[in-house]
Amino acid sequence: MSAAITNSPAPNLEPKLKIVIVGHVDHGKSTLIGRLFHDTNSLPEGKVEQIRKASEAEGMDFEFAFLLDALLEEQEQNITIDTTQLPFRTDLRE
């Protein structure tokens, strides 16, 4: 008897779905992704409150983009400097 090795995801989860967000400057890419992470409960506990406090300390309104644009320089200039890959999952997919 031999065991089969598979690369299948955990039981009851569909295969991974990879999403790429591209667009021009100030078209809401970071805001969309920040909101997506927030709405799917994919952020570490306390992350939203941490960003709210940091924004308040800088005299800025909270923006969902700040969940990704974590560098102070990014927040001050309202631009994304860094690129990254961030995994998240829903009840149905990784």
Image (cartoon, grey):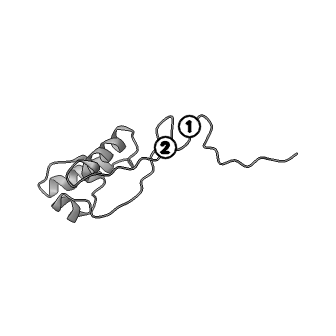
Left or right of 9? Residue 87 is: left
CB atoms of marks 1 and 2 within 8 Å: yes
Instruction: Name the secondary structure under disc 2.
Output: loop
The image quarter containing residue 25 is bottom left
The mark found on residue 64 in the picture is none
Residue located 38% across and 47% down the image: 43
> Dot 2, crowdedness within 10 Å: few (<14), some or many (≥20)?
few
| Residue 6 position in % (x across, y down) | 69, 47
- Viewer-side residue, 73 vs 55: 73
Q: Amino acid at mark 1?
A: Glu
| Residue 9 position in % (x across, y down) | 60, 43
Instruction: Name the secondary structure under disc 1.
Output: loop
| Residue 87 position in % (x across, y down) | 45, 50
Residue 8 seen in render = yes
Residue located 49% across and 43% down the image: 17
Which residue position is annotated with label 1? 14
Residue located 33% across and 48% down the image: 46
Residue 50 seen in render = no
The mark found on residue 17 in the picture is 2
Considering the image in quadrants, where does the N terminus appear? top right
| Residue 68 position in % (x across, y down) | 31, 54
Q: Amino acid at mark 2?
A: Leu
Mark 1 vs mark 2, CA separation in Å: 8 Å
